[in-house]
Image: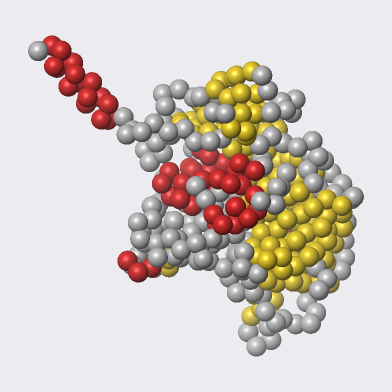
Amino acid sequence: MVRAVAAAALAALLSAAPSAAETLAPWVILGPAGAVVRTLTTEAACPRIRYDDFDRPMQVRVGPWADYPHTVCEAPLPKIVQRVTFAGRDVPVPKAEVRRVVVLGDTGCRIRGIFAQACNDPAQWPFQRMAAAAAALRPDLVIHVGDYHYRESPCPLPGAGCSGSPYGYNWGAWRADFFDPARPLLDAAPWVMVRGNHEDCNRAGHGWYRYLEPRARPVDCEAFTEPYRVEAGGLDLVVVDSAHALDRTPPPPLVERYRPQLAAARALARPGAWLLVHHPLYAVFRFDGPERRPLETNATLLAAAEGLGADPFSVVFSGHIHRFDVFRFAGDRPSQVIVGGGGTAVDPALGDGPDRFAIAGMDVAERVSDKGFQFLLLEREGAAWQATLHDLDRGAVRRCRLEGKNFSCPQ
Ligand SMILES: [Fe+2]
């Protein structure tokens, strides 16, 4: 009798546990303190990871909570470590010299209200294909310029091509939008993760801090975080968190919040550094009205940069607009490059505008705009970089070159 009761209690206990324990393959994020390895597990304790000839424990970053069933585990990855393995599989380690960089952004499958992308159709939401194609190019580093989580509402119609999709601010949506499709590229190289407005504190911010923010996790979702520098194998990067910067209107308190952030980012810039910020600093969203007036964006960051003087970066990489744009300037300002065609519903190309126009008071010397599911591969060539725009349907569509502050795409 006692034995029967004990067996029933044990069965009840087991049925309350996850049906199958799982531990994800790790991913590697570069941050201001170097590299960190992360994984997720439903096991009671964090796993161990192998650094060269030694096993070491991973620590708890945060335990399971509500709609996030995993413990997030992490371990710092010192530069001295040559090889990392986990469950017998290699984990990518930072290269001593980064020569090949993939840049992409805006990757999730958009379901919001009645707008629904066909997430179940790899032709219409191709992030997994893109991750595989980019991984095949053997990058040393991946830069994601923000906006990972897009499945905010239930699939609205049975015929919308997204039936069965998870949605909301929870693990299921993060897995479908990011962790499953990104896997080939997470296995290929360490990543630099930029925070987008989809990861702001009204949206997927909690998931952002659990999974992707490289630094210590705050107790609650923080709207603003400080800029930081990443040293990535001879490439200097400065990352700005612009998650809450408003596109069209610059509220003065927000401008005052971002101005010291942009100033701090500039102070971190070493010669040749790239600035990574989700919202473009110097861009035109569209040409408006019969006179094709350029509508500049991002209004908040443009206002915040006023009075800061010359911009020391060599290039600004952003996303947010879902296409490929380049704005090269006639004066001493870094080119603005937008790489936002990473899988979410694409925006129209910029189209015809005036022959000459300025952004934030400086003439644009060259502009390029392309529409499609696209990512950029940059290859080091001395002090310059060759950049190839890869379109999933059309192949290598543009060849550009970054030299000094000029990102140029001759046709
Ligand atoms: Fe965005």
Image: 379 above or below 62: below
In this image, 67 relative to 33: left or right? left
**Frontmost residue, 263 versus 346:** 346
Image: 399 above or below 51: below
Residue that appears at 35% across and 60% down:
163
Residue 254 seen by the camera:
no
Quadrant, the C terminus? bottom right
**Frontmost residue, 328 versus 81:** 81
In this image, 50 relative to 204: left or right? right
Image: 390 above or below 50: below
On the image, the x and y values in percent for residue 171 come to 43, 43
On the image, the x and y values in percent for residue 381 come to 87, 52
Quadrant, the N terminus? top left
**Number of residue marks:** 0
On the image, the x and y values in percent for residue 304 come to 70, 56
**Residue at the outermost bottom position:** 290
Residue that appears at 69% across and 76% down:
294
**Residue at the outermost top position:** 2
Residue that appears at 68% across and 66% down:
395
